[in-house]
Amino acid sequence: MKKIRIGCGAGYAGDRIEPAVELAEKGNIQYLVFECLAERTIAIGQRQKKHNPDAGFNELLGARMRAVLPACLEKGIRIVTNMGSANPRAAAKLTAEIARSLGAKNLKIAIIEGDDVFEQVMQQDLLLDEQQKPVSQCGKKIVSANAYIGAEPMVQALANGADIVIAGRVSDPSLFLSIMMHEFQWAADDWAHLGKGTILGHLLECAGQITGGYFADPGYRYVPDLARLGFPIAEISADGDAVITKVEGSGGMVTPDTCKEQMLYEIHRPDEYKTPDVTADFSQVTFTQVGKDRVAVSGGTGRARPETLKVSVGYEDGFIGEGEMSYAGPGAVERGRLALDIVKERFAITAVQPQEVRFDLIGVDSLHGATLSRNSQPYEVRVRVAGRFETKAAAAVVGNEVEALYTNGPAGGGGAMKSVKEIVAMDSTYIPRNLVTTSIDYLEV
């Protein structure tokens, strides 16, 4: 039975690059996938593109391509990625320039577009999921709307001979599923196989999380050599069953437990995982250790795909002003609490009115609040105040008040930090499929 080997070279926008190079050089893979797009990332990308028509794609795309292309060109490894973010065309142009500089010839780069549905969302005045209001009534400035598109345009690009496929807002598992659909000729309504392929895509999409990243817990769960964590490879058969593994000698591990944790990651209903391609059913999936760092996956399936596509909607949501200060030694907690009380009182005196505000003692109660954290007495603490405001000038007050604790607050404060960040918030909506039209273009090297 025909088998293919797919490696995942990145699980998020800023992921390490060396494991991808290791996959390309030593993984004996036919495909290398980079999953580099989060919901907020593409909204930020749209803003970057607005200011610079040549920007808006993953900022590490150039570094990744320079690192992996020599091995990929030599071995004929095809690349599929969503690093195009808000600007797949500019990402493809840079990739072509890098490929030419490396002496590449007869290279075909596919550009997948059509996920930008800003105009459609505004024209249809679609309902925002969390706010439960149409976009026209949400009271926010909408900056982006990108639909999660499925595998089909990438399948077509691969069938047309693309060596590198660069897309934007594609559903994460669809990046991997497109390769399986192309290689095994699975039809777009072959729900059982599409469900199995989607499960494999979901297992691979976070890269190092299935090889032991985010799994280690000293004293309970040991993961070897995390500093050289190897990224995953799926060895996939035409029936959709697979073995998850990694490059021999790389760090980390592949076990049924690491696979189970990844399978449940970001899953609400394992029997109803909705993607643009299929409604996958993870509920009967089994994992079996079949060798060192080799886990067999079987048992998934799927049903008909949803009639609508999820859309990530980005909107401007004001500014967060932040300030921090450290206190150490005996009485550090008490001095930290006094510092927070002073800032609270200063807000009242100067009529500072944040829309939201937090007063944290990092090391005491910043994560789980005062109830679960009671009786904690660390040797050192860090004061943190963060508030959300409508304007940048108003937000700047927070850091200034914390910094003023140097000479106006408790004894021994140090290491002040202050910042103001513009906030791009996210909501979701759902758009009928017939309102989303994807397109494919090609660059030749």
Image: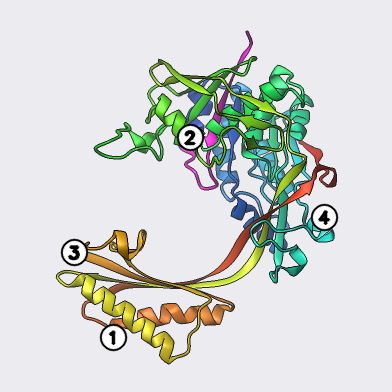
Q: Is residue 55 magenta?
A: no
Does label 3 or label 4 sit earlier along the sequence? 4
Q: Nearer the viewer, mark 1 or mark 2?
A: 2
Question: Residue 373, located in which quarter of the rendered image?
Answer: bottom left
Query: Pointer 2: what residue?
Result: 262
Q: CA distance from mark 3 to mark 4?
A: 56 Å
Amino acid type at circle 1 is Thr
Q: Disc 3 designates what residue?
A: 379
Which label sits in the foreground, 3 or 1? Answer: 3
> In the visual, does 431 lie left or right of 354?
right
Amino acid type, callout 2 = Gln
Mark 4, other Cα within 10 Å: few <14 / some 14–19 / many ≥20: some
Give the spatial CA distance, label 4 vs label 2.
34 Å
Q: Identify residue type, mark 4.
A: Gln
Q: Which mark is residue 120?
A: 4
| SS label for mark 2 | helix
Give me the C-alpha separation between circle 1 and circle 2: 49 Å
Magenta highlight range = 1-19
Element carrying mark 3: loop
3D distance between C-alphas at marks 3 and 1? 22 Å
Q: Name the element at disc 4.
A: helix
Sequence order check, earlier mark of 1 and 2: 2
